[in-house]
Amino acid sequence: MLGGTEILTTAQMRAIESAAIDSGKVTGLELMERAGAAVVDAILAKWPEYAERPEKFPWRATVLCGPGNNGGDGFVIARLLAGLGWETTVEFYGDADRLPADARLNYDRWCKIGKVYPLDLDVQQRFKADVLVDALFGIGLSRPVDAFCDYFDDIYAAVNNVFGGKSATTIDRLVAVDVPSFLCADSGRVLSREVMPWLEYDMTVTFHRPKIGHVIGDGPELCGALVVADIGLFQSRSDHVGDFTRAVSVRASDFAKHAFSHKFDHGHALIIAGGIGHGGAARLSARAALRVGAGLVTLCPPKSALIEHSGPPDALMRRAVDDAATLAEMLTDKRISALCIGPGCGVDRAGALLPAVLESGRHCVLDADALTALAGKPDLLPGLHKNCVLTPHAGEFARLFPDLAERLAELPERGPAYSKLDAARQASARCGAVVLLKGPDTVIAGPDGRAEIHSAYDVPWLATAGSGDVLAGLITGLLARNPPEYAVSYSTAFQFAANATALHAAAARRFGPGLIADDLPDQIPGVFRDLAV
Ligand SMILES: NC(=O)C1=CN([C@@H]2O[C@H](COP(=O)(O)OP(=O)(O)OC[C@H]3O[C@@H](n4cnc5c(N)ncnc54)[C@H](OP(=O)(O)O)[C@@H]3O)[C@@H](O)[C@H]2O)[C@@H](O)CC1
Ligand SMILES: [K+]
């Protein structure tokens, strides 16, 4: 999928484009031609039936062109499709005299071939197209599209055949150029204060690299199939375009074990469990930590709940921890290399044990009740450090960072809109720990400014009780295997949290529909085999 790819902000994309043009190796006009051609190629590749040209009944395309270079791409697409024999209609929103130079040139070239109909927001649209190409706004979308809501409603009706089978208004396929025109490419948020229809595109063709908005928020569902077209742009890390966000990727070497190592070389993970009747969550975490390769895993419930954990797995050790003093005493054993606190723990117990966990300086995962406890005890926040991984879902994030969550919930007034990526980055910088903000679009942000995104929109069965406990266990297991004192500079808590996120989704993908959290840890060996670990 997108593993390891850079995911760009619009500012980074513009900087890369400018650098290419300034180098003299390519012109903006050439890039626009390549972009338009890439969209046409993608249409023909996705729907090969369009490659055949029925002379009598040509394929029909409507191309919506906007006032900027996205519209310029649209004029190229219209020209190329017409050249292939398509009956092509162009609707233009904007003023030709104010088009950017390259877009104007392509507008003029189109005018030699066909008509330009003004796009009228006040007139009920009559679409009849095999393919509707949306080239209204791309990465230059700068403000809400409120005025376009009715227009997009009409498109929605045409796509979904709301007017019935015999209507003159039908659209078979909907293709976005670079980004659906109401979607902020920096945040994956719909830029509208009015209610917009949930208009899902069949395909979005973007250029050079995916943008943040394609992979988080509403982006993945609205964009449909994402095609990232090569338009011959080059890029070097020395370009001054800021830190790149990447898609999470994993390699076999991230998980390999070596022949001469013994169990303690793979670390010892402690999973703090809660009181009687709440043991399942911690057991899920413990099982995941074992499966991902921690050398030893010890489950630590209070003494009164030990009995609850007498069943399998037999590989799991159990030791009672009733209070912070006992935990601190246990942690004098330097071989304990990571802890997990939160799943099924109980908020009070988590609050009582957290100081000992944090003071130890060990790699630790704070999940579920530990996050709620932390939100209620802001005096503990300064104790967080770079070896901690916080794994909030949106609700827990809002409890911990209410101001950031509020900002995220506000209707965006302009682009680039505040994004889940921005929120996770700010949270991590503020608390000095790794923040893994869960969802189908999990964002992992490190206090050093690094961020990765893992998209799991294809595995909706992952949203199930206990799934987060397994993720916490996978992270803990990987952290246990890689204590900070052994870690090379790039192997930080951040990286293991990201790796665990990818394993978690891969396990769900491997199992498929019907998944419950208990199934996840046992898929890990298969995931490792697939990776050739
Ligand atoms: N970068 C690259 O390497 C390449 C880029 N290429 C293409 O260029 C695209 C970027 O072009 P772009 O910068 O001209 O911006 P674009 O998206 O056309 O929109 C700007 C216009 O829309 C207007 N506008 C904005 N919001 C609005 C609203 N709500 N309602 C009404 N109007 C609104 C805005 O108005 P303004 O804010 O200036 O008042 C301005 O007029 C990119 O997505 C890709 O397709 C490729 O050709 C090749 C390589
Ligand atoms: K567009």
Image (cartoon, rainbow, N blue to C red):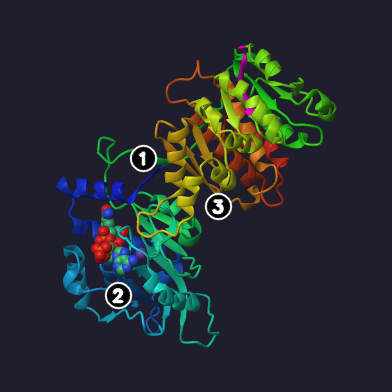
Residue displayed at 73% across by 25% down:
299
Q: CA distance from mark 1 to mark 2?
A: 38 Å
- Locate residue 201, reporting x and y percent: 46, 65
The amino acid type, in three-letter code, at marker 2 is Ala
- The quarter holding residue 446 reads top left
Q: Residue 101 — which label?
A: none
Judge whether residue 10 can be spotted in this image: yes
* Image vertical order of residue 308 relative to residue 120, above or below: above
* Residue position for label 1: 244
Q: Disc 2 vs disc 3: Cβ atoms closer than 8 Å? A: no
Badge 2: few (under 14), some or many (20 or more) residues near its Cα, within 10 Å?
many
Residue 337 sits inside the magenta stretch: yes
Residue displayed at 57% across by 52% down:
458
* Residue position for label 2: 82
Mark 1 or 2, nearer chain start = 2
Tell me which segment is drawn in magenta.
Answer: 334-340
Question: Nearer the viewer's eye, disc 1 or disc 2?
Answer: 1
Judge whether residue 69 can be spotted in this image: no
Residue 279 sits inside the magenta stretch: no
- The quarter holding residue 2 reads top left
Q: Quadrant of the C terminus?
A: top right
* Residue position for label 3: 457
Badge 1: few (under 14), some or many (20 or more) residues near its Cα, within 10 Å?
some
